[in-house]
Amino acid sequence: CAIYAGALLLFNILIYRSMPEEVQLSTFANGSLVITIFIEVGLLLLVGVIAIRKAVQRDFTSEMITSHRTTAMTGHTAAFGYLTGAPLTILCLTVVNWIACTILAGLAGNPIPAATVLFVILACLTAMVWTFTLLVALSTRGATSIGGWVIALGVVLQQVPSQVYLLH
């Protein structure tokens, strides 16, 4: 996580230093904020989905799933383990991105709590997608991934507000 935080900071500093002088810090911070949010969405909704599916697939391939069934572990505990253990690195990067987005929102002149609200909404969406991913992975023994469906749903949902706006 520290390497990612350093790379993110270095990347933003280098890009800002290479910008023309007429570009204000607030304009750059707004653009960087959007890029960081896109990176975060990609991490959570694509890489997280893949990590959960791979963990389930690995447990079925190595017969670890039978070990889960014979222990005193409840289903809730096993599901919670898949939802937090496999994407643990991604959750760490989420904290780094949240801190970066909070700082960038302040530099851009946006209300700082807006970044936190955005990450709370993203956390709710992520919990739903990851839980559905776990359900699909367990029912198909890890053979099916919903990553493509997540991308398609994102494209469709992005178009709905713009289409509604055009209809008015």
Image (cartoon, rainbow, N blue to C red):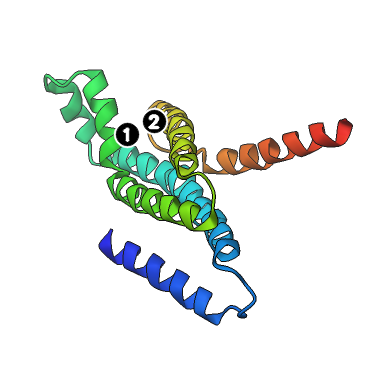
Measuring 60% from the left and 80% from the top, which residue is drawn there? 21
Measuring 56% from the left and 39% from the top, which residue is drawn there? 150
Up-down: is 124 above or below 55? above
Q: Position of residue 5 (x, y in %)?
A: 33, 62
**Quadrant in the rendering for residue 78:** top left
Q: Where is residue 45 in the image (x, y as percent from the top left)?
A: 48, 43
Indicate which label's residue lies in the foreground, 1 or 2.
Answer: 1
As helix, strand or loop, the secondary structure at mark 1 comes to helix
For marks 1 and 2, the one nearer the N-term is 1
Q: Mark 1 points at which residue?
A: 83
Residue positioned most to the right: 167
Measuring 44% from the left and 44% from the top, which residue is drawn there? 44
Q: In which quarter of the image is the C terminus?
A: top right
Q: Position of residue 22 (x, y in %)?
A: 64, 76
Residue positioned most to the left: 72
Callouts 1 and 2 close, C-beta under 8 Å: yes
Identified by mark 2, the residue type is Leu
As helix, strand or loop, the secondary structure at mark 2 comes to helix
**Quadrant in the rendering for residue 30:** bottom right
Identified by mark 1, the residue type is Leu
Q: Position of residue 87 (x, y in %)?
A: 32, 44
Up-down: is 9 above or below 35? below
Q: Nearer the viewer, residue 147 or 24?
A: 24
Q: Residue 117 carries which label?
A: none
Mark 1 closeness class: few <14, some 14–19, many ≥20 residues within 10 Å: many
**CA gap, disc 1 and disc 2:** 8 Å
Up-down: is 63 above or below 43? above
29 sits to left or right of 4: right
Q: Name the residue under label 2.
A: 134
Q: Nearer the viewer, residue 67 or 28?
A: 28
Measuring 23% from the left and 31% from the top, which residue is drawn there? 65
